[in-house]
Amino acid sequence: EAQVTQNPRYLITVTGKKLTVTCSQNMNHEYMSWYRQDPGLGLRQIYYSMNVEVTDKGDVPEGYKVSRKEKRNFPLILESPSPNQTSLYFCASSPRLAGPSQETQYFGPGTRLLVL
Amino acid sequence: DQQVKQNSPSLSVQEGRISILNCDYTNSMFDYFLWYKKYPAEGPTFLISISSIKDKNEDGRFTVFLNKSAKHLSLHIVPSQPGDSAVYFCAASVTGNQFYFGTGTSLTVIP
């Protein structure tokens, strides 16, 4: 089944304790992205990657790191989480780069993070 | 500053009637617009999109209209069904790399 998977789905942590949220897609998509969803703010893009070893900042990259060493994986790293990073996180992937026939993004199920 | 805005947090519609969801944007460079639907505890799923070179795109019960001069797009659902009850997000991009989403409109279709 074609899908985007995220782990863990739920995570409670404490301020300053490094964590990684994994994202994996089995559709051979080139483009991958991370978003956070917060009440009243909608979804905001954190980072995106157009291909292996190519990553760019989205709208709200502060406090986050990403890496794209393999096409299928795009982990989100919080080196020193803070309470304002408590949020619902979504990973997404898309089969094409930018162009006139842009493809939609396929989203994972979400990771709910609580930072105490 | 929110570049894509959905000013109606919620909308209720009778089954069988038309649902109209609205979205405004500020960046005239946006060239691609999308609507996503989201159920609780799931990720958003793609519904319909439109390129800036068009002013209308239709897919079954769903039609998206784009008014570039007003920087406004709308999603029409006809006829509305109870299964359409969800949160709807509009999104916009320039070049398809960076995406900006609205805050969402929660649609309730009353049977």
Image (tube, coloured by chain):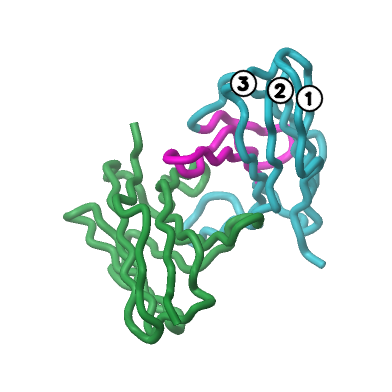
Chain colours: A cyan, B green
Say which quarter of the image contains residue A115.
top right
Q: Chain of mark 1?
A: A
Choose the circle earlier in sequence order: 2 or 3: 2
- Asked if one can make out residue A71 in the rendered structure from this viewpoint, the answer is no
The local secondary structure at tag 1 comes to strand
Question: Would you say residue B86 sits in the magenta stretch?
Answer: no
Mark 1 Cα-neighbour bin, 10 Å: few <14, some 14–19, many ≥20: some
Q: Residue at x 69, y 34 (%)?
A: A113
- A36 or B71: nearer the viewer: A36
Mark 2 Cα-neighbour bin, 10 Å: few <14, some 14–19, many ≥20: some
**Quadrant of image for the N terminus of chain B:** top left
- The residues bearing labels 2 and 3 have C-alpha atoms spaced at a distance of 12 Å
Choose the circle earlier in sequence order: 1 or 2: 1
The local secondary structure at tag 2 comes to strand
| Label 1 in the same subunit as label 2 | yes
The spot of residue A61 in percent (x, y) is 56, 25
Q: Which residue is mark 1?
A: A19
- B39 or B44: nearer the viewer: B39
Residue type, label 1:
Leu
The local secondary structure at tag 3 comes to helix
Position of residue B39 relative to residue A74, above or below, is: below
- The residues bearing labels 1 and 2 have C-alpha atoms spaced at a distance of 5 Å
Task: Tell us which disc is closer to us: 2 or 3.
Answer: 3
Residue A83 is marked as 3
* Cβ atoms under marks 2 and 3 closer than 8 Å: no
Q: Chain of mark 3?
A: A
Q: Which residues are magenta?
A: A32-58
Q: Which residue is mark 2?
A: A78
Image side of residue B107 versus residue B38, left or right = left
